[in-house]
Amino acid sequence: PAGAPAAPRIIKHGSLENSGVTFGEGLLAEARSAGNINQNSHDATVEVMELSATSKEAKEEHDKLMAQAEVSKKARTTVVPTAIEDVKAALRALGEPITTFGEKPFDRRLRLRSAMAKRALEGGVTDLKELGLDFSAGLGAPRQEASELDPAKRTEVFYTQASDALEKARARIAEHSFGRAAARLQKLRRRREAPAEAHRACLETYGEIQKLGIRGSQVVDTRPVACCRFSPLDDAAEGDAALGASRVATGSWTGLLKVWDAQSLAADVVCRGHTERVVSCAWHPSAAFTAASSANAAAYPNPMLLASGSADATVKLWDTRISSATPAPGAPKSALEPDDDAMDVEGRPAARPSMPGSAPCAATLRGHTARLASVAFHGSGACVGSTSFDHTWRLWDVETQSELLLQDGHLKPVYGLAFHPDGGLACTTDLFGVALLWDLRSGKQVHKMLGHVKRVLTVDFSPEGWQCATAGDDHTVKVWDLRERRCLYTIPAHANMVTEVRYARRSGEALLSTSFDGRSRVWSARDFGLLASLGGHEGRVLGGDASASERHFATVGFDRTLKIYARDVLA
């Protein structure tokens, strides 16, 4: 009737059954038959359509992908050990193969993490401690009492009795380091008292470096050249006089060492004796090629010793005084004479110099059981150090040609080596990504530098004494503050493996890095900005060095050439 209130509308979500809303049976049956109403039924007599084979495969694939996604999600939060032996022990406890063909340590850790996550989702093992494994102590074995562990496999710090020769060497090193430290600190105080003068000298050095260009190039050998080193030089020499008075030593994969005149790139001396490729070389800190040393080698007090390390597991010392070198009769031309492609400073073909002499081998130091990686002279000149793939580094007495120290402590092969400018510390790096700092006066490990994610191949100390640079396979250069024992800065230096880092030898204001990406770069040691990018090599750069005058740089590489960089006169 008119004026009567309208019936309220009812909106129902879900099933209409038992809702109080009534429908005619005919209308409900018609809706069901049209498929507009879905009604669940638990009646066993109701016929259910089976999934097709394609649908079953798709469902199984979907379930499999969802399970993999759950495992990956769980694996991201699963904690597993990092040491190689610990990872293998955990895989063995889980019943998994400890390694597969071609598997690397990183891949092995991922496989352990996935296995742990899968078992956790299946309601199995959620923690390795449930299997009796405890890696908190780094033992990588089932938890046992210390007395039950095999003494041969026990990991602990131990000390051995030092020989009389080592004790005397440590006393000499201590005396040397105290004097050098006092002189270094006095020099730093003078620089601090005259900051304007120090800043002006730094800017002059940076200005010279920013104008670097290739001054000369020489084909060194028939195989890649692995290392190069400028000879030490009197601080009074500057500019072209410094370059003319210095020599550059190179070591190549042919097993030859050669000493080159840094200005003319003429070979002065060739050193033969290694049966495998030369991997590293180092000058005695007192070596200096001056007119006096060349004219009267026998009376000259400073030995022109050159140390070399080789894949034949030996360290050799060479007397490279020019007058003591004698021509080697019957030697092949390619081994003795400079290449026809040598250029002088003006870019013209260099005049062919006289045939270089063959330097006598002063000593051969044997003891390593695997190939060598680096050699370096101690600042006192009385000792030479070497690192090897036998997981040790050693210290040798130059005078007696005997082994003073055999030091282990690295989990992987030891590669880089550098001595602190004071002489009291040494730093070694390994292929596990760790750098260790050693006190040579006490024989103790004083610091462990952790931060690289791949192999650490090279290390060098700043002349200022408080910075240390390391680099390697992670394409970065890390600068460490030895006072605070922390990483000061990480330089994203190259696009490939960094093969060497070298500080400028006098002021330490610049840092040279060489890389497999074919470039060498010079960085500021103050703000770590890029000063110069040095090109010219047609392949990987294997090594480099900065001259004592800090005005010249040298690099060697896979293209078998030695390149000298100096200020471009046209810049």
Image (cartoon, rainbow, N blue to C red):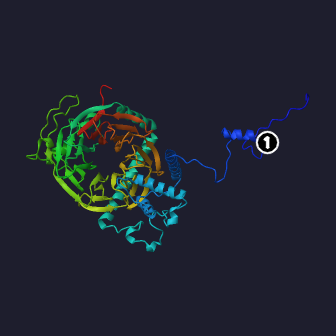
In the picture of the structure, the residue carrying the numbered disc 1 is 22
**Looking at the image, which residue is at 67% across and 50% down?**
41
Q: Position of residue 333 (x, y in %)?
A: 12, 41
Residue 448 against residue 242 in the figure, above or below? below
Which of the 4 image quadrants contains residue 517?
top left
Q: Say whether residue 209 is left or right of residue 93.
A: left
Which image quadrant: the C terminus? top left
Q: Position of residue 8 (x, y in %)?
A: 83, 35
Residue positioned most to the top: 570
Which of the 4 image quadrants contains residue 100?
bottom left
* Secondary structure under the numbered disc 1 in the rendered image: loop
Q: Say whether residue 384 is left or right of residue 254.
A: right
Front in this rendered view, residue 398 or 105 = 105
Q: Position of residue 147 (x, y in %)?
A: 44, 74
Front in this rendered view, residue 26 or 117 = 26
Q: Position of residue 542 (x, y in %)?
A: 29, 43
**Looking at the image, which residue is at 30% across and 40% down?**
541
**Residue type, numbered disc 1:** Thr
Residue 24 against residue 409 in the figure, above or below? above
Which of the 4 image quadrants contains residue 508?
top left
Front in this rendered view, residue 272 or 6 = 6
**Looking at the image, which residue is at 67% across and 43% down?**
38
